[in-house]
Amino acid sequence: MKVNEVNPNLFTQNRPPVEQSSKQEFLTLLVAQLENQNPLEPQSGSEFIAQLAQFASVEQGEQTNSLLSQIQAEQVSASNAGMAAFVGKEGSFKTDTLQIDGDSTTLPGVGFEVLSGSPKARAVITDENGKEVRSVDLGTLRPGDHQLEWDGKNSLGQAVDPGRYKIEIRLEDTEGAESTVPTTVSGTIESLDFSTGYPMLRIGGALFAPADVLSIR
C-alpha cells in the first residue's frame, strides 16, 4: 500500500462497536484521514476547510432533526390531551371493523340502513386473516335503520380472542344478487387507550380510531 493511500477497512476497524450518530461518524472519518495522510503530501488547506464546513452542516442537520422531534412530541401530547375531552360523550364512528380488546361480551351495536326491503339479510364476521368466525341470519328486513347486536362469540358459541374483526351486512334481493351496506358504531366513549402506541377511543370492549369519527355529541 502506498503512503498516501488510505485503507478503507481502517475506518471500520477504528470505529467502536456501538452505534454512532452521523456527526460522530463524520468526525471519526476525518480524524482517521488526518492520521493516515502522507506527511510529504498533506491535505490542502482548502480541502480541509471544505470538510470542516461539511462537518458543521452535518451537526446543524442533527440539531434540526432533534428540534423537529421535540416539536412533534409536543404536538402529539397536545392532541392526546385534547381527545381526553371526548370521554363521557356520545361518539359515532363509520367503520366495518371492531377491534376487540379484552371483554368481548360488552361490544357496542353495529348500525346500518336498508334503503329497500330485502328478502334475505345476514351478518358475516371475519377475523384479521379473512376467516369467517360467525354468520348471523337477520331474516327479512324492512327499509329503515337497523342494528346488529353481536355477542362476541363464534359459530361454536365461544368468545372470540382479542383482535380486529370485520363485520359485513349482506343483503340479497329478489333475484339473488348480494350487496353490502355501510356500517356505523355509536355509544358512550368510556376512555382513551394507548396500548397500541397511538390513541384509541373505547366503547365497551371495542377500540376505535379517531380517524373513523363521524360525530361527537
Image (cartoon, grey):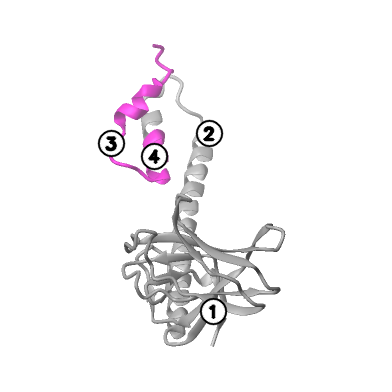
Residue with the most extreme left position = 17
Is label 2 or label 4 in front?
4
Q: CA distance from mark 1 to mark 2?
A: 64 Å
Q: Secondary structure at mark 1?
A: strand
Position of 186 relative to 178 (above/below) = below
- Which residue is drawn at the image coordinates 39% and 71% (left, top)? 151
Using the image as rendered, state which of residue 144 and residue 68 is in the foreground. Answer: 144
Position of 178 relative to 207 (above/below) = above
Q: Residues within 10 Å of mark 1 (few under 14, many from 20)?
A: many
Q: Secondary structure at mark 3?
A: loop
Q: Secondary structure at mark 2?
A: helix
The segment highlighted magenta reads 1-30
Task: Confirm or deny contact between disc 2 and disc 4 (CB under 8 A).
Answer: no
The residue indicated by pointer 3 is 16
Q: Residues within 10 Å of mark 3 (few under 14, many from 20)?
A: few
Report the quarter where the N terminus lies: top left
The residue indicated by pointer 4 is 25
Q: Earlier in the sequence, mark 1 or mark 4?
A: 4
Task: Confirm or deny contact between disc 3 and disc 2 (CB under 8 A).
Answer: no
- Measured as percent of width and height from the top left, residue 71 is found at 47, 67
Using the image as rendered, state which of residue 62 and residue 131 is in the foreground. Answer: 131
Q: CA distance from mark 1 to mark 4?
A: 52 Å
Q: What amino acid is at disc 3?
A: Pro
The residue indicated by pointer 1 is 92
Q: What amino acid is at disc 2?
A: Glu
Q: Relative to 112, is 204 on the left or the right?
A: left
Using the image as rendered, state which of residue 26 and residue 128 is in the foreground. Answer: 128
Q: What amino acid is at disc 1?
A: Ser
In magenta segment, residue 16: yes
- Measured as percent of width and height from the top left, residue 107 is found at 40, 73
- Which residue is drawn at the image coordinates 64% and 68% (left, top)? 119
